[in-house]
Amino acid sequence: MRLGEWGEAQAAALLRRKGFRIVAQNFRTRYGELDIVAEKDGFLVFAEVKTRKNDRFAAAREAVDARKQERLRVTAELWLQGHPTGLQPRFDVIEVYGGPGTEPRLVHIENAF
């Protein structure tokens, strides 16, 4: 299993433990990809998952720069066009540190941008 796939599975499990319902995963368009779309308490959460073996070089969230945020916004708008929900959209970032065969360290940053 790729590191990224493992990280996305860990992030989805975290969201389920927190009471979120996973609506979609890996929604792709020519503009970008939504890792996880989930809902809870009137929010539709577009969660960007960043997986790293460790944070010695930098925090995983730092990879979600302004350019990446704009691509996520455009992709989320496209998702909403095909899946109107009436829920308040929100962008979260979930950092996953570790790898297959290890206990992950997860950091869920709500309303990240």
Image: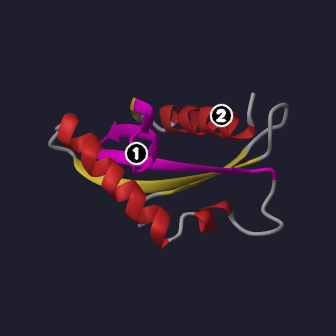
What x and y, as percent, mark residue 26?
48, 35
Which residue: 33% across, 40% down? 40
Residue 43 falls inside the magenta stretch:
yes
- Name above or below for residue 108 compared with residue 82: below
* Residue drawn at the location 35% of the way across and 49% of the way down: 75
Q: Answer with mark 1 or mark 2, whichever residue precedes in sequence.
A: 2
The residue indicated by pointer 1 is 30
How far across and how far down the image is residue 36, in percent? 46, 39
Any part of residue 111 in sight: no
Instruction: Tell me the magenta residue range.
Output: 24-53
The type of colouring in the image is secondary structure
Q: Residue furthest front?
A: 30
Residue 50 position (above or below residue 63): above
Residue 1 visible in the picture: yes
Q: Is residue 108 left or right of residue 105?
A: left
Q: Is residue 96 above or below residue 99?
A: below
* Dominant secondary structure (helix, strand or loop) of the stretch shown in magenta: strand
Mark-to-mark CA distance, 1 and 2: 20 Å
Q: Is residue 55 magenta?
A: no
